[in-house]
Image (cartoon, helix red, strand yellow):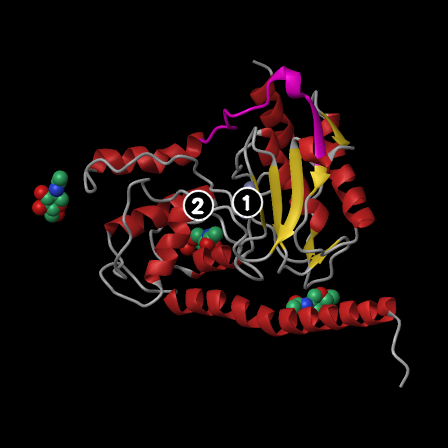
């Protein structure tokens, strides 16, 4: 057989690595998703005073999103008072019945994929763990979530963005078009403009897909659970979990890239999570759904943050 020209070999190599990557992703995906959901399902109905495998992971999940005091140390798999309180706060945020129990509507809510940013930013440290006053304070904090305080100065209202290296999930033109549309939604209701940087190195915002650990402290976690994160001003990183089944026009198995982009861009501008299920800034997004348009709550949020 005649030696193949190098560019043909390269093409074969590329095709081969794409195939193996796809194969790996396919076998990895259902397994991961299964373990988180099935572990939650097993916990359903476990109540205070009991010990169950999986409760420690549940506590870590709640802590990650701000439902534990900042100084909490999570060690045991006991369903204790602290977990009950964290669950109540979670249930209040997501407008579920505030039972403090692991009922099915609570575990169902946790199974919906969501943004990696916390719902309660900088939760206060615990005071006396069993004082009713501190419980009361923590419990009511959720109702008064605000729209953030970190923001861009007026000199930075003309923001630039670029697409970073990372996992290639979409071709650049697709990504460009989706991100331009998503930025446009915020530009229409604020003083911001968003332009792709010609000199990538100096862009204010960097957009990329990553899988698993990617160098910040917030590793992605395979399919489901966490979809993406966008950092508050003036950080500018918007990263998507490359292991989701992304699409620009999702089927029932896929996650809508534009919906998640509009949400994460809200964080880039300084907005926090809203507990209004219709709002773009609501933390969760069901697989297979599109939620691309700002609601009045989102618009009020950006106005409140940037008018004084
Ligand atoms: C809350 O509890 C009521 C009465 O038990 C029930 O009808 C309703 O479906 C529950 N809501 C949620 C979100 O679970
Ligand atoms: C917490 O509760 C326990 C038992 O319910 C009690 O013995 C203890 O004194 C309480 N601690 C505080 C700081 O209130
Ligand atoms: C990704 O979505 C496609 C299109 O609906 C579907 O065929 C495929 O099974 C999905 N993959 C996973 C791992 O869910
Ligand atoms: Zn978010
Ligand atoms: Zn990250």
Residue 121 image-quadrant placement = top left
Magenta highlight range: 145-161
Q: Residue at left 59%, top 52%?
A: 227
Tell me the residue at 43%/64% (across/down): 40
In the displayed structure, 261 sits above or below 140; it is: below
Residue 140: x and y in percent read 36, 34
Res 191 seen here? yes
Instruction: State the residue in front, 207 or 67.
Output: 207
* Residue furthest to the front: 3
| CB under 8 Å between discs 1 and 2 | yes
Q: CA distance from mark 1 to mark 2?
A: 10 Å
Q: Is residue 280 visible?
A: no
Where is the N terminus found, in terms of image quarters? bottom right
Queried whether the magenta region covers residue 233, the answer comes back as no
Q: Quadrant of the C terminus?
A: top right
Q: Which residue is mark 1?
A: 283
210 or 84, which lies in front? 210
Please indicate whether residue 47 sits to the left or right of residue 234 in the image.
left
Give the residue at the far top of this rendering: 308
Residue 146 magenta-drawn? yes
Q: Please give the residue where the numbered disc 2 appears in the rendered image.
A: 65
For mark 1, give the secondary structure.
Answer: loop
How packed mark 1 is, by other alpha carbons closer than 10 Å (few <14, some 14-19, many 20 or more), is many
Q: Is residue 230 left or right of residue 76?
A: right
Residue at (22% x, 35% y) in the render: 127
Mark 1 and mark 2 lie on one chain; the one further toward the N terminus is 2
Q: Residue furthest bottom?
A: 1
Which one is in front, 304 or 46?
304
Q: Specify whether tag 1 is near ligand 4 (CB below 8 Å).
A: yes
Along the line of sight, the residue nearer the viewer: 154 or 293: 154
**Residue furthest right as drawn:** 2
Q: Please determine whether, in this image, residue 234 is positioned above or below residue 76.
A: above
């Amino acid at each position: 057989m005649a030696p193949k020209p190098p560019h043909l070999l390269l093409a074969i190599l590329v095709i081969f690595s794409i195939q193996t990557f796809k194969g790996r992703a396919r076998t990895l995906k259902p397994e991961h998703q299964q373990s988180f959901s099935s572990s939650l399902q097993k916990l359903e109905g476990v109540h205070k005073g009991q010990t169950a495998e999986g409760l420690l992971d549940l506590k870590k999940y709640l802590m990650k999103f701000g439902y534990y005091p900042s100084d909490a140390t999570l060690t045991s798999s006991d369903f204790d008072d602290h977990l009950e309180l964290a669950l109540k706060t979670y249930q209040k945020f997501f407008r579920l019945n505030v039972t403090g129990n692991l009922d099915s509507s609570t575990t169902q809510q946790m199974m919906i994929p969501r943004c990696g940013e916390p719902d309660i930013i900088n939760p206060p440290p615990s005071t006396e763990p069993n004082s009713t006053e501190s419980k009361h304070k923590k419990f009511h904090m959720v109702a008064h979530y605000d729209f953030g305080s970190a923001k861009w100065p007026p000199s930075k209202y003309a923001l630039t963005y670029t697409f970073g290296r990372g996992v290639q999930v979409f071709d650049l033109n697709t990504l460009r078009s989706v991100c331009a549309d998503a930025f446009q939604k915020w530009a229409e209701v604020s003083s911001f403009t968003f332009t792709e940087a010609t000199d990538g190195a100096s862009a204010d915002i960097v957009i990329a897909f990553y899988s698993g650990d990617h160098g910040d402290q917030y590793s992605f976690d395979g399919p489901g659970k966490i979809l993406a994160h966008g950092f508050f001003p003036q950080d500018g990183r918007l990263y998507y979990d490359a292991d989701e089944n992304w699409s620009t026009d999702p089927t029932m198995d896929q996650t809508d890239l534009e919906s998640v982009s509009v949400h994460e861009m809200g964080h880039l501008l300084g907005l926090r999570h809203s507990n209004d299920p219709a709002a773009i800034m609501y933390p969760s997004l069901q697989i297979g759904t599109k939620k691309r348009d700002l609601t009045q709550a989102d618009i009020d949020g950006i106005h409140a943050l940037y008018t004084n």
